[in-house]
Image (spheres, rainbow, N blue to C red):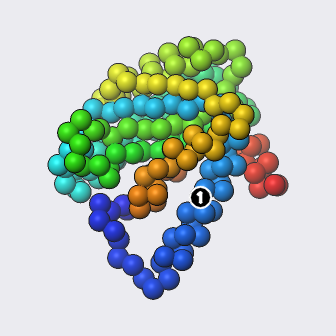
Amino acid sequence: MWYTQHPPQCPHSKQLDCRSKLRQKVYLTDIAQHCTYGLTLHTTLKTFGRSSLTLLDHFETTRHSLHQLRVRSNRALTGNGWQRNPRYLPIFVPVIEGTVNTYDRNRTLHIHLAVGNLPERYTEKDLLGIYRGCWLSNRCAADDVKIARLWSGQENGWLNYFTKEERQGRTDSVDYHNTQIPQHILATLQAA
């Protein structure tokens, strides 16, 4: 559960919070090495002047839309390959942002998405078309989708941008409910 205000603190929570943020950053940095593209997807869900309850509802709507995007894009990219062979499963790491900004009239909830382990036959333009098409089939999707190739060594800069709300106190912006990482890639992370 996330809070628009700071959650109640226990005496050791700051130290625990720092350690968990560090572990999350290490984990995401390791995963980012396997990601080849970053996407930004916008919703139609406005945040200006919204109550915590409304933002929570928007957050859950966005999370549900991400689930649909993940399943649709897996199928569009690999057919049924991702179900038959776990090595074909694309990396999908979403971050939902916008809940800490209720003062900007034009702000909406939006998603930053790191993807990787994609079939090599697709160009950047193909991938934009696939993800855009899958995204726009959701009821809260705005037709504002951007894609950027992540070059080797650039992943950490993008990851820093990707997790900016975490530095503002929102530690649950990474949507682990919809994160997917193929087992063979997870095994390399655990071995390191």
- Front-most of 134 and 33? 33
**Residue 56 in sight from this viewpoint:** yes
Q: Position of residue 124 (x, y in %)?
A: 59, 17
Identity of the residue drawn at 47% across and 50% down: 164
**Residue 178 in sight from this viewpoint:** no
Identity of the residue drawn at 57% across and 40% down: 158
Residue neighbourhood size for the residue with mark 1, other residues' Cα within 10 Å, grouped as few (<14), some (14–19), many (≥20): some
On screen, residue 129 versus residue 37, left or right, reads: left
For label 1, the residue is 24
Identity of the residue drawn at 23% across and 43% down: 104
On screen, residue 27 versus residue 42, left or right, reads: right
In the rendered image, the quadrant that contains the N terminus is: bottom left
142 vs 10: above or below? above
In the rendered image, the quadrant that contains the C terminus is: bottom right
Q: Position of residue 80 (x, y in %)?
A: 63, 24
- The quarter holding residue 16 reads bottom right
